[in-house]
Image (tube, rainbow, N blue to C red):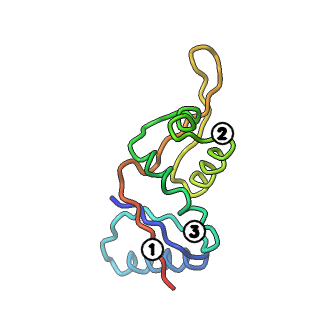
Amino acid sequence: MTANIKIGSIEDFFESAKQTAKEIDEGKKITRKHTIWVEPSDINELLKRTELIHYLRNKKKITVRQIAKDMNRSSASLKRDLNVLSKYQLINIYTEIDEKNRARSLVESSFGNQKIEVKAEI
């Protein structure tokens, strides 16, 4: 399955949902979609993080500290980038307590090996 990132406003999202509901009412078979709607003003912020998205593609669960080390990034800039990806549900960030009773931040990819397509209509 492919994750689709569509650029559009909340009105575009509701128009898409309305079209899907209409197809259901007409008895058409609907295929499952994984669509993430991004406001036009935010798409550039998301596209700036493609290197991080590629890095996370094959990771199941990884600490923020390990990502920073592997990518030679500061914690502050990495957390800023992770928050952008989390906002659009491309990753999940959560805290876990390790065996030494220390809290650590973990990142889990929501898209795995799925292809991510960015679609824009102008």
Q: Residue at x 57, y 53 (%)?
A: 85
Task: Give the label, 2 or 1, closer to the camera.
Answer: 2
Q: Which residue is mark 2?
A: 75
Sequence order check, earlier mark of 1 and 3: 3
Cα distance between the residues tagged 1 and 3: 10 Å
Left or right relative to 9: residue 32: left
The one nearer the camera, 14 or 101, is: 101
Task: Give the label, 2 or 3, closer to the camera.
Answer: 2
Type of the residue with mark 2: Ser
Q: Which residue is mark 3?
A: 43
Q: For numbered disc 3, what is the local secondary structure?
A: helix
Quick one: label 3, few (<14), some, or many (20+) residues within 10 Å?
Answer: some
Type of the residue with mark 1: Lys
Type of the residue with mark 3: Ile
Q: For numbered disc 2, what is the local secondary structure?
A: helix
User: Furthest residue to the bottom?
Assistant: 122
The one nearer the camera, 29 or 59, is: 59
- Residue 66, x across and y down, in percent: 53, 32
Q: Which residue is mark 1?
A: 119
Sequence order check, earlier mark of 2 and 3: 3
- Residue 114, x across and y down, in percent: 36, 54
Cα distance between the residues tagged 2 and 3: 23 Å
Quick one: label 1, few (<14), some, or many (20+) residues within 10 Å?
Answer: few
Q: Quadrant of residue 116?
A: bottom left
Sequence order check, earlier mark of 2 and 1: 2
The one nearer the camera, 31 or 92, is: 92
The one nearer the camera, 21 or 56, is: 56
Cα distance between the residues tagged 2 and 1: 31 Å
User: Furthest residue to the top?
Assistant: 100
Q: How many marks?
A: 3
